[in-house]
Image (cartoon, rainbow, N blue to C red):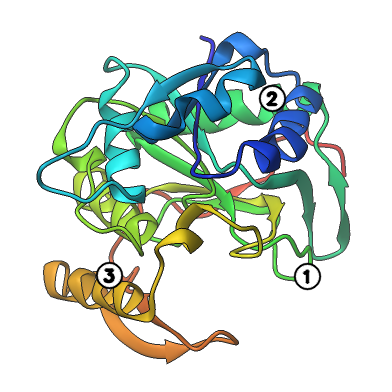
Amino acid sequence: MTEQYAIPSRQRPATLARKTLPLLGQLGVQREQVDVWVDPDEVEDYAPLGLNVRVVPAATEMPLRVGAARNAMATGYPPGTRLIEIDDDVSKVSIGWRGRHLTPMTPDLWRQTLDYAWGQCEFYGLGLWGPYPVHNDYFMRPNTTTDLRYATGTLFGTILRGDTTELVVTDDKEDFERNIRHTLRDGGLLRVNWVAYETNYYGEPGGMQSYRTPELVDAGARTLSRLFPGLCSYAGKVGKNGNPEVRLNRRNTGVASPLPLPDWLPA
């Protein structure tokens, strides 16, 4: 089954043309598989890219930000769709783990990786999969896990079922929220720890940077800790950026022990 790719983008047509679109071409993705989702007043800015441009509708329950865009994409395709969401500033997708240096993903390996991820999701009854969140082979591992772990909104796949699990109520931290909601429904999520992507988080103009504030970041973390107290907690300001974060609790989650590397993967 062919995947549908959806790219949320805000004020970044040049970035999209420079980064994610060439990457998708390198992975063998056809332009007709790709939609870009934009705000109503930006349709003309993205038209020259030659993609199917879709509009994020204004929603009364949420401001026109990333949460509304994610919900529009989740409800914009029929149940059963294998949807890959990828941000507009991803420049690499690679394979590697500690002891094996990162190497670029080829079209054939991308196809095998997708078939593997969809197949494992269907076998274990999971609806969400994602790669390792850091493009650094030192931290990556030659396995795939099914418990509650962080799979970012930058690149992930879902098998849509058309239920409220696929919707979010937050803007900042919406990826943590998605991980938790899928774990509540399915018991976990599939994280492929030998695949990673490269992006310049928050380094490009536009995108979330056009509205992201410390208050919004903090509100997202506090909302999740209030909504899902058993699966996450408010961690306060951590990391090099000093942003408020949440800490996931993966205890008693997951549907299988860590899965070994597939035998088709070159060592």
Q: Is residue 13 above or below residue 141?
A: above
| For marks 3 and 1 on the same chain, the one whose residue lies earlier in the sequence | 1
Residue 258 image point, x, y percent: 53, 54
Residue 43, image x and y in percent? 46, 25
Where on the picture, by quarter, is residue 24? top right
Q: Residues within 10 Å of mark 1 (few under 14, many from 20)?
A: some
Instruction: Identify the residue at horizontal 86%, vertical 64% (top origin).
Output: 99
Whether residue 256 is visible to the viewer of this picture, yes or no, is yes
Quadrant of the rendered structure where residue 223 is?
bottom left
* Disc on the earlier residue, 2 or 1: 2
Residue nearest the viewer, comparing 254 with 134: 134
> What residue lies at 27% left-to-right and 73% top-to-bottom?
232
- The CA span between labels 2 and 1 is 23 Å
Give the secondary structure at mark 1. loop
Q: Which residue is mark 1?
A: 138
Above or below, 76 relative to 144:
above
Residue at 47% across, 50% down: 153
> Disc 2 designates what residue?
112
Name which residue type carries label 1. Tyr
Q: Amino acid at mark 3?
A: Gly
